[in-house]
Image: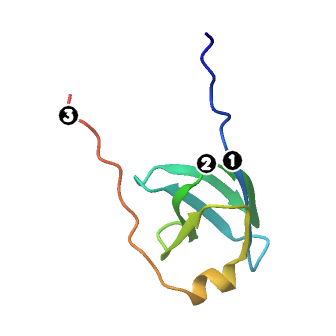
Amino acid sequence: MSATRATPVYFKLVIDATAPVTELWLGDDAGYLVQKEVGGLRTSLWPGHYVVEFGRGTSSYPIHLVKASRSAQTALEAGSTCARLMPQLLPE
């Protein structure tokens, strides 16, 4: 009998920035940086909870990725903000 492995499921995420120089910082639900892009973000990710900032240290906006998704910066900024967790490092 052979063990079957589940095929990983990834969803496309596209976020269009309002300006070509806008930095997009994408973090996971534990606060770790997942990806940084300028002018827009195009990626494929595991389903889950993420946050995006449009410039380092600006407000964070939640993204709950459960299917392929496309958003604009203006649409995300019109919604609610959320706290961005800071990664906790284990003591040595």
Q: Are marks 2 and 1 in contact (CB under 8 Å)?
A: yes
Tag 1 secondary structure? loop
Q: Foreground: 12 or 67?
A: 67
Q: Earlier in the sequence, mark 1 or mark 3?
A: 1
Q: Earlier in the sequence, mark 2 or mark 1?
A: 1
From the viewer's perspective, is residue 15 above or below residue 4?
Answer: below
Q: Residue at x 61, y 80 (%)?
A: 76
User: Residue 64: x and y, percent?
Assistant: 55, 66
Q: Earlier in the sequence, mark 2 or mark 3?
A: 2
User: Residue 61: x and y, percent?
Assistant: 52, 74
Label 1 sits on what residue type?
Tyr
Tell me the tag on residue 56. none
User: Residue 40: x and y, percent?
Assistant: 75, 66
Quarter of image, res 70: bottom right
From the viewer's perspective, is residue 80 above or below residue 14?
Answer: below
User: Residue 15: x and y, percent?
Assistant: 72, 69
Q: Residues within 10 Å of mark 2 (few under 14, many from 20)?
A: few
Tag 2 secondary structure? loop
Picture quarter with the C terminus: top left
Q: Which residue is mark 3?
A: 91
Q: Residue at x 52, y 56 (%)?
A: 27
From the viewer's perspective, is residue 20 above or below residue 89?
Answer: below
Q: Is residue 79 left or right of residue 31?
A: right
Tell me the tag on residue 10. 1
Q: Which residue is mark 2?
A: 46
